[in-house]
Image: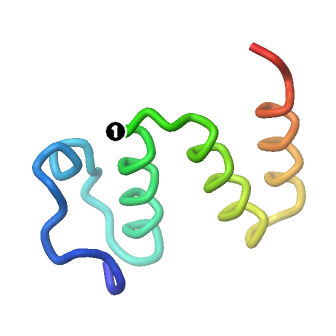
Amino acid sequence: MSRMAARPPSLLRKRMIAVSGPWEEFCYIVALSVSRQHNAIHRAILILIFSHNSSEVNAKVRNRTATPT
């Protein structure tokens, strides 16, 4: 977590998965979004992150979040 806080709040620390490397920051962002229950922000962050990966994954995320629940 290079740009993240050295010690996340205890609620986030309990929800984090033990990972290292580029996925560490990803899991921190997801845990932060889930813990605050901001679903729209959570989806936007996922779309933003996946847009840097593959267009196929990005399309799947967009299709899933665009459909009404």
Residue placed under numbered mark 1 in the picture: 35
Name which residue lies at 84% across and 43% down: 62
- Percent position of residue 38, x then y: 50, 37
Name which residue lies at 25% across and 57% down: 18
Q: Is residue 9 above or below residue 62?
A: below
Name which residue lies at 75% across and 72% down: 52
Task: Check the picture and name the quadrant holding the C terminus.
Answer: top right
Q: Quadrant of residue 51?
A: bottom right
Q: Is residue 14 left or right of residue 56?
A: left
Name which residue lies at 34% across and 38% down: 35
Label 1, secondary structure: give it.
helix
Task: Check the picture and name the quadrant holding the N terminus.
Answer: bottom left
Q: Is residue 9 left or right of residue 39?
A: left
Given residues 17 and 30, the one toward you in this image is: 30
For this orientation, the residue located farthest to the bottom is: 2
Q: Amino acid at mark 1?
A: Ser
Given residues 45 and 52, the one toward you in this image is: 45
- Percent position of residue 17, x then y: 29, 51
Q: Is residue 31 above or below residue 19?
A: above
For this orientation, the residue located farthest to the top is: 69
Q: Quadrant of residue 43?
A: top right
Given residues 58 and 41, the one toward you in this image is: 41
